[in-house]
Image: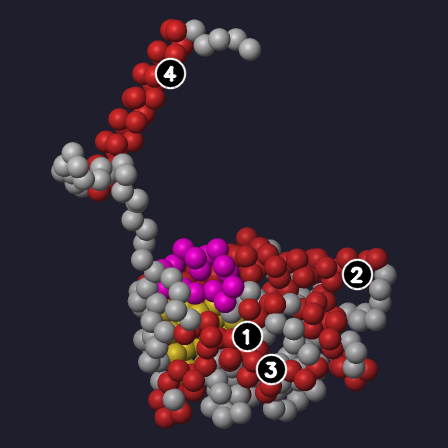
Amino acid sequence: MRKTRPRARAAVAVATAALTGLATLTACDASGDDSSGPNGPSAQDRPAPSPTRVWDPSPRSLAAVGDSITRGFDACSVLSDCPEVSWSTGTDGGVRSLALRLLGKQRAETHSWNYAKTGARMADVPAQMARAAAQDPDLVTVLAGANDACRASADAMTPVADFRADFEESLRTLRRARPKAQVYVASVPDLKRLWSTGRTNALGKQVWKLGICKSMLADADSMTATDVRRRETVRQRVVAYNKVLKDVCAKDLRCRYDDGAVFGYRFGTGQLSHWDWFHPNKDGQARLAEMAYRGVTARRG
């Protein structure tokens, strides 16, 4: 091991002193105050302020954007929307939607709006968000992405980069009109979990053959290497979508992600529509509402 030469040690000391001085100067300039006395904390010692996240757990109005889940598709009758049981804005007392829990029955009827659309993908959400913003809501709920993964084939799924761009545009659309509106983002459900649960029902598998989410549900009983790999590819795309939702939302002070609550929830046959064994039924919608209410009202940063 070579000894450090005196000249090298001197150079290191000079460089260290210079860097320390530069750091102190930069910190003072950033704070706009270098008047600390000799006994007070220097700007270098003070922690840098972090942005304060703003969240009101008691919003007084609510709008929803998203896809068939938020429209209550197949929850009341076959192949039809049933927005009255929507987890976000529904009026059904058995579901106790997020709007009912936050606003109460009377106000929910006049101060909640559902702009979700069955079949919508993330690319459709910016337009929905524009309509929602026009109502000046305190809170907007977002649940979208399942249709980006549920395509005719795994190759046809929405690329992650496009999904990110569409979600970012959705938030920009809202912010241009309503800078202070809050956004609650639900994670995309685990489609592979829904396949695993629904495939236990023979009738459900017959319905799936009509074309529901082919990328995941096609050849539901097949366990060939190709089909196993296809299902896992779809699942990993959903995982990637949820990471996008989390990352983009984290950059917005008035956006709150559900931390994967919907993705991680173990939906059973008791929460699935008995018309398609894929969409949430009324009980499933109630579980979504409960998760959302906990997420919106949680006291956190």
Q: Nearer the viewer, mark 4 or mark 3?
A: 4
Mark 4 sits on what residue?
12
Task: Give whichever of discs 1 and 3 has the lower sequence position.
Answer: 1
Judged from the image, the secondary structure of the residue bearing numbered disc 1 is: loop
Q: Which circle's residue, 4 or 3, is located before the other in the chain? A: 4
Q: Nearer the viewer, mark 1 or mark 3?
A: 3
At x 64% / y 79%, what residue is drawn?
A: 279
Residue identified by numbered label 2: 228
Label 1 sits on residue: 67
Label number found at residue 147: none
Most extreme residue toward the front is 39
Relative image position of residue 199 (x, y in whole percent): 78, 76
Judging from the image, the colouring scheme is: secondary structure
Question: Nearer the viewer's eye, disc 2 or disc 4?
Answer: 4
Q: Is residue 157 left or right of residue 196?
A: left
Q: Give the magenta part as a residue range.
A: 245-259
Is the C-beta separation of discs 2 and 4 under 8 Å? no
Q: Amino acid at mark 4?
A: Val
Closer to the chain start, of discs 2 and 1, is 1
User: Label for residue 284?
Assistant: 3
Amino acid type assigned to the residue bearing label 1 in the image = Asp
State which tag comes first along the sequence, 1 or 4: 4
